[in-house]
Image (cartoon, rainbow, N blue to C red):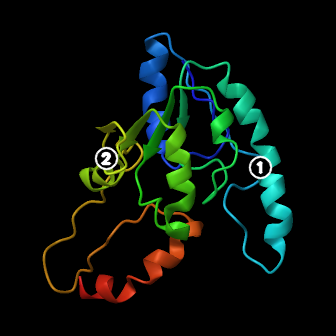
Amino acid sequence: DGAGSRGSPSRGCGVEAVRAPLGRAGRDVVWGAAPVATEAPTGRGVGAVWFPAAVVARVPAVVDSWRSSVTWLGREMVATACTLEAFLKRPLVLDVDDAIWLPRGGRGIRRLVRHVDLVFAGNEFIADWFRELGLPVEIVPTAVDVNRFRPAAAPAPGPEHEVVIGWTGTSSNHQALLHLAGVLETV
């Protein structure tokens, strides 16, 4: 009935999109932010303290999963490493809307999927990657709250108007966007 996840889900918008409909069907979706960041902070030597703290901070999510009918993850419980996922209650659904297999050559994700019963993929490209691992996959397009995110009014046509491209990333993946600056300028 609920997701045993306390992390900030990669598809938080997706989780919120299904919370109300599932509630109307008598199902609860439970999630919240982890008390320690699930992404490694930058800085020399910080990882030696952060990693064990992040793992310990995820223990309540493991306990919560055992009160749920389904455990729903957006990625590893601690970024790029499979840690406590084997202890989560199953069935375990992995909800993916990004190429989360790229960091560290996908080692964490390849270990995580050993425990996964189903993958919700945001698109066909992601679905194909997980199908190659022999996992059952359902395509669930990435949800966008259209009541909250609306396109701006179209500017009048003409060369003096700029093209505006929206981006919904976070500070953790901002560097990837910066690598596309030249391409975006061309667009």
Q: Quadrant of residue 135?
A: top left
- Answer with left or right where residue 55 lies relative to residue 49: left
Identify the amino acid type marked 1: Val
Q: Residue furthest left?
A: 157
In the figure, 91 relative to 178: above or below? above
Which numbered disc covers residue 74?
none
Residue 129 in the image, given as x and y percentages of width and height: 33, 55
Image location (x, y in percent) of residue 36: 78, 52
Asked whether the viewer can see residue 12, the reply is no
Q: Residue at x 71, y 35 (%)?
A: 61
When asked about the image quadrant of residue 184, the answer is bottom left
Neighbour tally class for label 2: few under 14, some 14-19, many 20 plus, Cα within 10 Å: few
Most foreground residue, 89 or 151: 89
Q: Is residue 187 left or right of residue 21?
A: left
Which labelled disc corresponds to residue 55? Answer: 1
Residue in view at x 23 percent, y 80 percent: 161
Of 94 and 158, the residue lying toward us:
94
Which tag, 2 or 1, sits closer to the chain's start? 1
In the rendered structure, which amino acid carries the disc numbered 2? Arg
Residue 65 visible somewhere in the drawing = yes
Name the residue tied to disc 2. Answer: 131
